[in-house]
Amino acid sequence: MNELNRLPEPDCLKKLMIVQSMLNTILCEEEWLRYHSFDPEWAKEVSMAKIDNGSGDHLFILFSNEGTIVKGFDHESPLSPHAQDEYAVLSGIYDQVPDSLLSLLDDEALEREDVTFCIWRENNDACWKKGEVNAVKDADDGSGFLLGTIYQTAEEFVKFADNYYELSLPLVIVERVYAGEPITMDMIQMLNPDCDAEKVYQELLFSSQTV
């Protein structure tokens, strides 16, 4: 389960998802087209991060007082419910997930049954855990690919933005955002000169997207 080593501590993961969401808000006016998003008040005492590549693959991350759960779906994976003779979540993916975390996926918007892997960590856990599907050996569940879309450095995000949004971002500004520096109107304009900087700034304030 080497892919679990790619996940930072929950608090660091949450900050990364907020940073990437803020940057996506600046780079993309249409909310439904954004690759990374974050809702600080998804449910009572629960925040939610989402990665959606627009090609049928997604990653949901729920942060709660009980811990953190990551649900991933790679539509091309042989572990997909859609790849089974009868549509079904494969045994093992959710079996060991604590009820306190699994219940966070009950909202229809989270598409609980569209899943190829699940990772979780309760607050008292020393490491991340992952559900294993024993019936399908060596099958790619998409976790390596999808966890790789959590860009942990400014350099990685700049490369992503160039490929996905076709925008060349000033690395020094992205580094300041990754460092937790409050975003200013000037920073917004330097990152995306074509956007309505005032509108974007107000959206960032209204959505409470702060590190």
Image: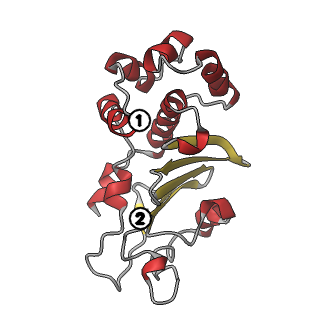
Q: Residue at x 54, y 21 (%)?
A: 195
Q: Residue at x 37, y 47 (%)?
A: 149
Q: Is residue 2 left or right of residue 149?
A: left
Most extreme residue toward the bottom, as rendered? 85
Q: Which mark is residue 10?
A: none
Q: Residue at x 51, y 17 (%)?
A: 188
Most extreme residue toward the right, as rendered? 44
In this rendered view, identify the residue nearer to me: 31 or 109. Answer: 31
- Up the image or down, 3 lies above or below 87; here it is above
In this rendered view, identify the residue nearer to me: 23 or 48. Answer: 23
Observer-side mark, 2 or 1, equals 1
**Amino acid on which the number 2 mark rests in the picture:** Asp
Q: Position of residue 16 (x, y in %)?
A: 45, 37
In this rendered view, identify the residue nearer to me: 22 or 118. Answer: 22
Residue on which the image places disc 1 = 165
Q: Quadrant of the C terminus?
A: top right
Residue on which the image places disc 2 = 74
Q: Residue at x 38, y 75 (%)?
A: 132
**Amino acid on which the number 1 mark rests in the picture:** Tyr
Distance from label 2 to label 1 (Cα)? Answer: 21 Å
Q: Position of residue 165 (x, y in %)?
A: 41, 35
Q: Quadrant of the N terminus?
A: bottom left
In this rendered view, identify the residue nearer to me: 53 or 208. Answer: 53
Packing grade of label 1 (10 A; few <14, some 14-19, many >=20) is: some
**Image quarter for residue 204?**
top right
Q: Which element carries disc 2, helix, strand or loop?
A: loop
Q: Which element carries disc 1, helix, strand or loop?
A: loop
Mark 2–mark 1 CB contact (< 8 Å): no
- Up the image or down, 206 lies above or below 160; here it is above
